[in-house]
Image (cartoon, helix red, strand yellow):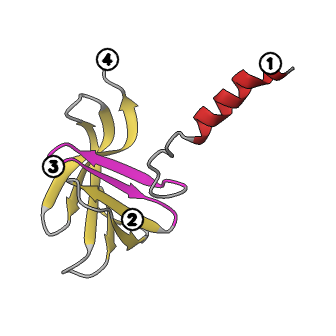
Amino acid sequence: MRKAAFPFLLLAAGCATAPAPYAPVRNVAYQAIGSRNFWVLTIGDDRIVMHYGGRPDRIWPRTLPRTEGDRRIWQSGDETDGIRIEARPGPCSSENEDLYADFVTVHLGVELDGCGGRLIRRAQR
């Protein structure tokens, strides 16, 4: 019996040391990604998280988007320390050729362009 339990103990130990996946929010409402200075934007139930260029994540309270023409716009924080996200209908092709539903521009003191929303097609790898 002891010999049969040993592999299971090793398996359990291996699972206990695995790092948790990066998950900045629960219940993702919208995501976008950009390759210039690599950035990832995640909008969840209660917050907006921006991971940008190796810097620590920045977090703002979640706001509901407003619609202007064909764009959805999220605005959180003030003009000096806030974030503005604009999503426009695509399709948008990322640098690795994945195809997303939206073109995305993030205004964060600098203007960052990328793709976001629903993944339409994953590139052949």
Contact (Cβ within 8 Å) of mark 4 with mark 3:
no
Which amino acid type is marked by label 2? Ile
Determine whether label 3 and label 2 are within 8 Å by CB: no
Position of the N terminus by quadrant: top right
Mark number displayed over residue 60: none
Which of the two marks, 4 or 1, is nearer to us in this view?
Answer: 1
First reached walking from the N terminus: tag 4 or tag 3: 3
Residue 61 location in percent, x, y?
41, 74
Q: Residues within 10 Å of mark 1 (few under 14, many from 20)?
A: few
Disc with the residue nearer the chain's start (1 vs 3): 1
Q: Nearer the viewer, mark 1 or mark 3?
A: 1
Label 3: state its secondary structure. loop
Judge from the rendering whether residue 86 lies leftward or rightward of residue 29; answer left or right.
left
Residue 29: % across, % down: 47, 55
- Residue 39 percent location from the top left of the image: 25, 51
The label nearer to you, 4 versus 3, is: 3
Quadrant containing the C terminus in the rendered view: top left
Q: Which residue is mark 2?
A: 48
| Front residue of 93 and 28 | 28
- Label 3 – label 2 distance at C-alpha: 19 Å
Q: Which residue is mark 4?
A: 124
Q: Write down the region rendered in magenta.
A: 27-45
Q: Which residue is mark 3?
A: 37
Q: Dot 2 lies on which element?
A: strand
Amino acid tagged 1: Ala
- The residue singled out by tag 1 in the image is 4
- Name the N-terminal-most of marks 4 and 2: 2
- Toward the viewer: 9 or 51? 9
